[in-house]
């Protein structure tokens, strides 16, 4: 199975800050990497697909980049409504696997 | 609008089975795949498997092989996930999620989740 790691596991930032989360795959997954946001008690929400494509309706402050084994997710200007846990997910190889998540809150 | 609506919470005893439903609306059901993802309390996301709503092809996570069955009813646009021989560590919220296409892809629409509690 492809192992996904994320760092940091949690972070606190101020409103307006730039926030960056990294995700690393245990082997080359090309660009078959997606990012989700999950708020407490809610289902995950797709933000970024295929490493860098913004899902329809998602604010442009969210972005993704990378290919191969190393990926980055960025919130350009953190907003209070962005408080959530963020997961990366690969679908290059079965089984589909998720990263352990990064919890983001407001300082 | 495009949505997936899941069945309600379940409480089961160890060794029992549970069947969760996921009714799709607002799109052509047979043009997409459905994956099932679960989340134990306070834990991360675990992919359980996938079914093509077009032809019923499935692919299950190895750790659940033999205990899980995913099916669809195209007449009602509903997907089902049955998990047998339940154990306490199957206690989780179970989500269905639509793939962006027929094959494995990003999960662009999610159900609201179904809490399954396994307890004696």
Image (cartoon, coloured by chain):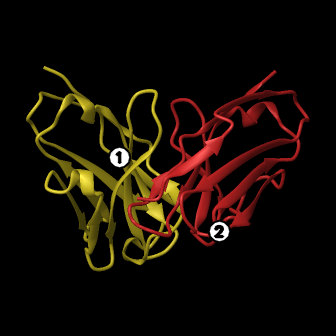
| 10 Å crowding of disc 2: few (<14), some (14-19), many (20+) | some
Q: Is residue A107 above or below residue B93?
A: above
* x and y percentages locating residue B23 in the rendered image: 34, 56
**Picture residue at 47% right of the left edge, 59% below the top:** A2
Q: Where B105 sits versus A75, above or below?
A: below
In screen coordinates, is B64 left or right of B105?
left
Return the mark for residue A68: 2
Q: What residue would you read off at disc 1?
A: B6
Residue that sits furthest to the front in the current view:
A26
Q: Nearer the viewer, residue A3 or A10?
A: A3
- The residue furthest left is B15
User: Are there few (<14), some (14-19), or many (20+) residues within 10 Å of tag 1?
Assistant: many
Q: Which chain is red?
A: A
Task: Name the residue rendered at 49%, 74% in the picture.
Answer: B101
SS for dot 2: loop
**Residue A79 image point, x, y percent:** 82, 35
Chain name for mark 2 = A
Which chain letter goes with mark 1? B
Residue at horizontal 43 percent and vertical 54 percent from the top: B4
């Amino acid at each position: 199975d492809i192992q996904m790691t994320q760092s940091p596991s949690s972070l606190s930032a101020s409103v307006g800050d730039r926030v960056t989360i990294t995700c690393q795959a245990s082997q080359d997954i090309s660009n078959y990497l997606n990012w989700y946001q999950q708020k407490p008690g809610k289902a995950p929400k797709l933000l970024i697909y295929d490493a860098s494509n913004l899902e329809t309706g998602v604010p442009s402050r969210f972005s993704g980049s990378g290919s191969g084994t190393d990926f980055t997710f960025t919130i350009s200007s953190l907003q209070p409504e962005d408080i959530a846990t963020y997961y990366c997910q690969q679908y290059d190889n079965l089984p589909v696997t998720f990263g352990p998540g990064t919890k983001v809150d407001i300082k | 609008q495009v949505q997936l609506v899941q069945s309600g919470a379940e409480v089961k005893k160890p060794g029992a089975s549970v069947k969760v439903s996921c009714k799709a609306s607002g799109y052509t059901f047979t043009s997409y795949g459905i994956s099932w993802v679960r989340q134990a309390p306070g834990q991360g996301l675990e992919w359980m498997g996938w079914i093509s709503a077009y032809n019923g092809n499935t692919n299950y996570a190895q750790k659940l092989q033999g205990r899980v069955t995913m099916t669809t009813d195209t007449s009602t646009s509903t997907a089902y996930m049955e998990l047998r021989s339940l154990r306490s560590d199957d206690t989780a919220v179970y989500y269905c999620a639509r793939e962006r296409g027929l094959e494995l892809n990003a999960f662009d629409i999610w159900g609201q989740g179904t809490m399954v509690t396994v307890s004696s």
